[in-house]
Amino acid sequence: SRQAKAAIRPAPSAAYEKIIEEASGIYRVETGLVKAVIRAESDFNPAAVSHKGALGLMQLMPDTATLMQVGDPFDPVENVLGGTRYLAQLLRRFNGDKILALAAYNAGPEKVEMYRGVPPYAETKMYVRKVMEYYKVYGRK
């Protein structure tokens, strides 16, 4: 049965535990938040590609990947390092406000600044809510 298979399969985050811990340490972003973003973005699928062209575990847009010096967005190590670095920059830009940083991760920082808060896009509002739910699950470590 599918449930039995799911039960014996390790948590998808386990495969990336080491790199998530490392990236979190380097860029000082909570591991729980990084995991929550990965879960919401790609459900831990390193080969994920969105309809908008976002790539890999943390669904980096090609321009963001380049900016974060990610050579291969499908390489989990490079992707998590780049995505976490970007998340750290957004957290700094929005004074540690997770809600605004996540909205910026989804819609772009310019939009968050323009609307002075979470942009009024259904997708962005849902994204922020989803990540924060996962964040509770993964713990505030």
Image (cartoon, rainbow, N blue to C red):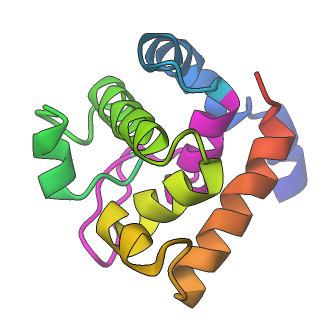
67 part of magenta stretch: no
Q: Residue at x 55, y 58 (%)?
A: 100
Q: What is the number of callouts on the image?
A: 0
- Where is the N terminus found, in terms of image quarters? bottom right
On the image, which quarter does residue 86 sit in? top left
On the image, which quarter does residue 8 sit in? top right
Residue 110 in the figure: left or right of residue 104: left
Q: Residue at x 82, y 57 (%)?
A: 2
For the question of whether residue 131 can be seen, the reply is: yes
- Where is the C terminus found, in terms of image quarters? top right
- Residue 56 against residue 1 in the figure, above or below: above
Q: Position of residue 76 (x, y in %)?
A: 36, 31
Q: Position of residue 74 (x, y in %)?
A: 26, 41
Q: Position of residue 104 (x, y in %)?
A: 43, 61
72 and 87: which is toward the camera: 87
Q: Residue at x 37, y 54 (%)?
A: 59
Residue 72 in the figure: left or right of residue 138: left
For the question of whether residue 1 can be seen, the reply is: no
Q: Position of residue 41 (x, y in %)?
A: 51, 57
52 and 49: which is toward the camera: 52
Range covered by the magenta-colored residues: 32-56
Q: Residue at x 60, y 69 (%)?
A: 127
On the image, which quarter does residue 131 sit in? bottom right
139 and 91: which is toward the camera: 91
- Residue 45 against residue 8 in the figure, above or below: below
34 part of magenta stretch: yes
